[in-house]
Image (spheres, rainbow, N blue to C red):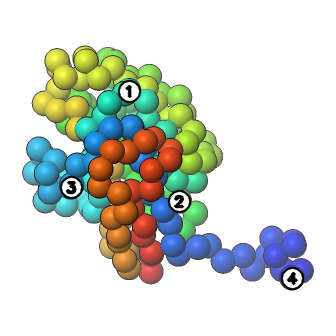
Amino acid sequence: MFKKMFGKGEEVSKQIEIKAPITGKYVAIEDIPDPVFAQKMMGEGFGIAPSEGIVVSPIDGEIVNVFPTKHAIGIKASNGLEILIHVGLETVAMKGEGFDTKVNAGDKVKVGDELLTFDINLIEQKASSVISPVIITNSDVINTLDTLNNGDLVRGESTVLSISVN
C-alpha cells in the first residue's frame, strides 16, 4: 500500500489500447496504397481514411518527434511502445503546407489531446493519398495485437488496437 502511495514500485502496464487519432474509416495496413506501410516495413498498425483534418493523441505518452514538415508525429507510451502518426502518403513533399502542429517534442499528452490539424483537400490535390498510417515503429516489443474496431472511427474515442508488450 505504501509503495503505491509514494509512487515507488509502480509497474508500467504491459497492456495498452490504441485509440483512433483521426475520425474516419479504418483501413487495414495491407490495404494502405504504399508498399513501405502495407508490407509492414516500418511496423504493425493500420490506416485511416480521414473525414476531418484533426489529429489527436491515440495514447497517453510523450511526443518524441514532430517532423519539420509537420506531416508526422511520433509518440512514446510509458511502457515503451512507439507510435508514428503519418498524415497522408507522400505528404513530406508538401513541406508543411496545409499542416499546423499543436505540440513539440518533449510534450506530455493524454488520449484525445490535439496534436495537429491538416487540410484534407490540399492533401488530396498535392499528395498521392489522404490515407493516414498509424504505425507501431517498435513492433518487436509486441507480444499480442488485437484489432478491436475496423469500421468507422471517432478520434480519441474508438479503440482500434489492444496490444500487450513484452
Q: Which mark is residue 29?
A: 3
Q: Do callouts 4 and 1 mark residues in contact (Cβ within 8 Å)?
A: no
Q: Marks 2 and 3, Cα distance to the nearest angstrom?
A: 21 Å
Cα distance in 3D space between marks 2 and 4: 25 Å
Q: CA distance from mark 4 to mark 1?
A: 45 Å
Which is in the foreground here, disc 2 or disc 1? Answer: 1
- Of the numbered discs 2 and 3, the one sitting upstream in the chain is 3
Instruction: Name the residue located 53 percent from the left edge and 34 percent from the top edge.
Output: 114
Q: Could you say whether the residue bearing mark 4 is in a helix, strand or loop?
A: loop
The residue carrying mark 4 is: 1
What percent of the width, then of the height, locates residue 12?
A: 62, 73
The answer to whether residue 127 is above or below residue 113 is: above
Residue 64 shows which numbered tag? Answer: none
Mark closest to the chain's N terminus, 1 or 3: 3
Which residue sits at x=48%, y=62%?
A: 17
Q: Which residue is mark 2?
A: 77
- Image x and y of residue 106, in percent: 58, 44
Q: Nearer the viewer, residue 141 or 60?
A: 60
Judging by the rendered image, the residue that carries numbered circle 1 is 53
Q: Nearer the viewer, mark 2 or mark 3?
A: 3
Q: Is residue 105 above or below residue 129?
A: below
Whichever of callouts 2 and 4 sits on the residue coming sooner in the sequence is 4
**Mark 2 vs 1, N-terminal side:** 1
